[in-house]
Image (cartoon, grey):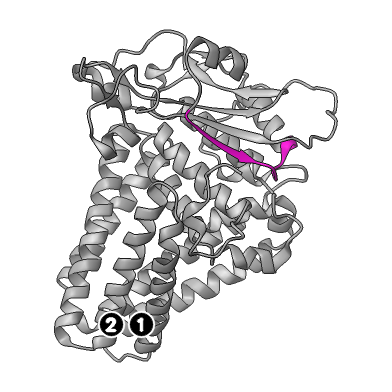
Amino acid sequence: MLQLALLLSGADFVRRNAPLLAVIGLLWGGLGVSIFIDGLQGIRYFPLHIFGILLLIESLATLMLAPGGVGAQKAVLYFKGGIFCFVALLILSGRNSSNLLLAVIFGFAFFITGLFVMASAWVVRYHGWRRAFAAGVAQLLFALFLFFPYPTHHHGTVSQFLGAIMMAGGLQCLRLAWRAFRLRDGAAVFNLLAPGGLLPETAAPPQEPDPLPYDGSLVVHIWTPEGSAASKPIRRPVFNRYIAAVDANGVISTGHAALEMPPELYISLYPAVDIDRSPSEFFNTLKAIQENNVAGQYQQSYASESAAWCESDRKIVFHDFNPEGLRRYWASYRQAEVYNLTWRNCSSSVAYGLEAALDGVFARGGWLTFLRLFFIPELWIAAQLRKRATTMAWTPGLALDYARALHAIVHPARLSWRRRRRQDDAS
């Protein structure tokens, strides 16, 4: 969440407040250490019931907003609100059995997340996968500690859980502050957050004349696997949305994603030659290694692509964005005509292009706007989607949900939560 909030706030805000960001990271991490030790000692100074009441209020607010979600956002909000409400009620009950049940819930959450991180890091081998694999091992060990809290007991489960989360958040804040200190004048926050190797480092982008100010729109085009299938696909909701749709004839449709700033810029990446997706080569194809890179091909325009194939069935339109940031991204990104099924595909090209376009979109807001971002449910949704996509692969379904979440942040609905369910995904 912090990464996206800094991205939306812009380089000037990040560079100016880097010292304060470091202080916040130290204080937050230090508070996490004290809360964790509090849980270990069993002498609870942490106001657990106040925390439970605040968590209950937040969960009820999330459940009230959930009906206005679009697509997978609705399910995520219901899931988050329901889990938080259940945890809050367990905390407020104050029973010994509740502490044991909380330990089981938190432990399984860390255990499953750790296994997922380790498996995805080992299979995909993305940039920094060894560090991610070690983080997954640490989550597994912490899960075992929550299950069997020797030499302490389950009374400190909530304090131990919160302390660990706050320590990790403090370390991330310090890491971002350190990188912000090294942010050069003219650099973008996107360059701090972009995965390693995404943009070519050997060659500088070609010098182009300064373009005129752009006052048009930015369009994210999504061809969903179901919408782009030649015939009606077999019903498999989650698989069809995020991976691929298969019709009765066995024809596979994976969908597609593109980003358009008409008429100047169009980002749509295809492999120049079809990739072997046979079951025997599945795991090898997923690896984000140089050997799996193939020649890529950029499409010329949405008009030509849609004429040769079909119209996109989802369009998310942004009116507030940073056209110069998108131009810089595209000038560097297009130098390499490379396609990789996992780390450099059509959906990742669009997701990172959208991030570059939204770099500093709230640059004039200051601290009040920055803090307000953390109270927007879609920021949490966008952060979770980005985390899952960067540890496995961007797909058209994930890019669609990510674009929708960012659209809700940049263009918040001005309707009440009762009427938000009627709002379209395109403005």
Residue at (20%, 72%) from the top-left corner?
103
Mark 2: which secondary structure? Answer: helix
Query: Residue at point 74% right, 35% down?
Result: 216
- Which of the 4 quarters of the picture holds residue 87? bottom left
Task: Write down the region rendered in magenta.
Answer: 313-324
Q: How far across and down, in percent of the image, does residue 1 sit?
A: 50, 57
Residue 52's label in the rendered image is 1
Q: Is residue 57 magenta?
A: no
* x and y, in percent, of residue 318 in the image: 64, 41
Query: Distance of mark 1 from mark 2, alpha carbons?
Result: 6 Å
Picture quadrant where residue 32 is located? bottom left
- Amino acid type of the residue tagged 2 in the rendering: Ile
Q: Residues within 10 Å of mark 1 (few under 14, many from 20)?
A: many
Q: Indicate the amino acid at tag 1.
A: Gly
Q: Which residue is mark 2?
A: 91
Is 231 displayed left or right of 152 in the figure?
right
Q: Are marks 1 and 2 in contact (CB under 8 Å)?
A: yes
In this view of the protein, which residue sits in the foreground, 421 or 309? 421
Q: Against 355, is 331 above or below? A: above
For the point 67% across and 50% down, the residue is 182
Among the two numbered marks 1 and 2 on one chain, the one whose residue lies closer to the N terminus: 1
Secondary structure beneath dot 1 equals helix
Asked if residue 149 shows in the view, the reply is no
- Is residue 250 visible in the rendered image? The answer is yes
Q: Around disc 2, counting alpha carbons within 10 Å, would you say few (fewer than 14), some (14 to 19), or many (20 or more)?
A: many
